[in-house]
Image (tube, rainbow, N blue to C red):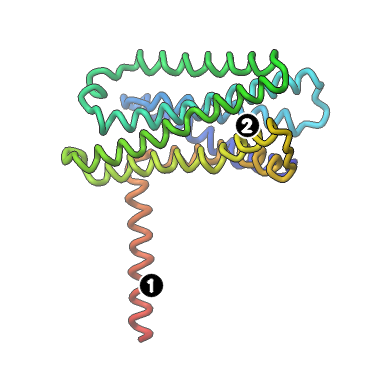
Amino acid sequence: MYVLTCIIIAIGLPLTLVAIYALYSMARSDHVAPIYVINLLITDLIQLCCMIVEVVPTVDEIISLVFYCIYLSALFASVYFMVCIALERYLVIAHPLWYRFGRTIKISAVVCVLVWILSLVFVILYYFFDYLVTDIIFVTFLLLPFPLLIFFLVGTIKALSATISVPSDEKRRIVGILVLVLLIYTLLFLPTIIWYIKDLNENYDEILDSLSFIFVQLSPLADSVLYVFMRKGTIDKLLASVCCCRMDSNDISRSSV
């Protein structure tokens, strides 16, 4: 697990910095920078920095505890910024008029501040309450986004089937983003929730503990993939490459026959 953490840091840190720089360049080019994605990448950067402290063997115990609390706060914030991204994509399709006229930078900034404050409150509660209460708080706060992400995905797909004003490539990009967000949450965070639930029932599972810890540490890498998918044309290029591979394989099979 120590080696795996070092590998995640070595890969995730430069990828996250490159993504943040790309978004910064987008903002300087008079484009509207996706504020939720920027905050999500900031949480990833904080997590990776805390991982660096974790793998240093000579860190004081108090410093290690402080950085662990910071790591939990950033992890919690990253989950809810993914919910904000899914909500934004849902509003683009299901409520386009409200999104066009009601969405402002001020509202987005207020939502980001609320997420950061909520994550800080979570860490304070996690630190000051006893073991049983902290587990219940952790499971509750991490499980809340699951029905929301499913609702945004289903609602977006229903709205897309009824609209004709959205181009097909934009439809694929929006659905792809929502599916990827749900997959990241399901694959990387649900094992941790399951482990905490089993721990509440005094049914400790060492293998599930290790796997859930590894999956959670992979979240910064998964968020980098999410940023790539949010760029225009990425999903179309991916689908085009898959189609080309299928056509080439069909041509080979026909020529062999």
Q: Residues within 10 Å of mark 2 (few under 14, many from 20)?
A: many
**Residue 34 appears left or right of 81:** left
Is the residue under label 1 in contact with that under label 2 (CB below 8 Å)?
no
- When the figure is inspected, residue 216 is found, relative to residue 75, above or below; the finding is below
Write the residue at 77% across / 31% down. 56
Number of numbered discs: 2
Q: Considering only order in the chain, which callout, 1 or 2, is on the residue closer to the N terminus? A: 2
Write the residue at 67% across / 36% down. 198
**Residue 163 appears left or right of 176:** left
Viewport quadrant of the N terminus: top right
The answer to which of 88 and 6 lies nearer the viewer is 88
Distance from label 2 to label 1 (Cα)? 41 Å
Q: Residue type at mark 1: give it.
A: Ser
Mark 1, residue position: 249
Residue 40 is labelled as none
The answer to which of 82 and 13 lies nearer the viewer is 82
The spot of residue 159 in percent (x, y) is 24, 37
The spot of residue 238 in percent (x, y) is 38, 53
Is residue 9 something that shows in the picture? no
The answer to which of 21 and 192 lies nearer the viewer is 192
Q: Residue type at mark 2: give it.
A: Leu
Judged from the image, the secondary structure of the residue bearing numbered disc 2 is helix
The spot of residue 242 in percent (x, y) is 37, 60
Write the residue at 28% across / 30% down. 92
Mark 2, residue position: 48
Which quadrant of the view contains residue 127?
top right
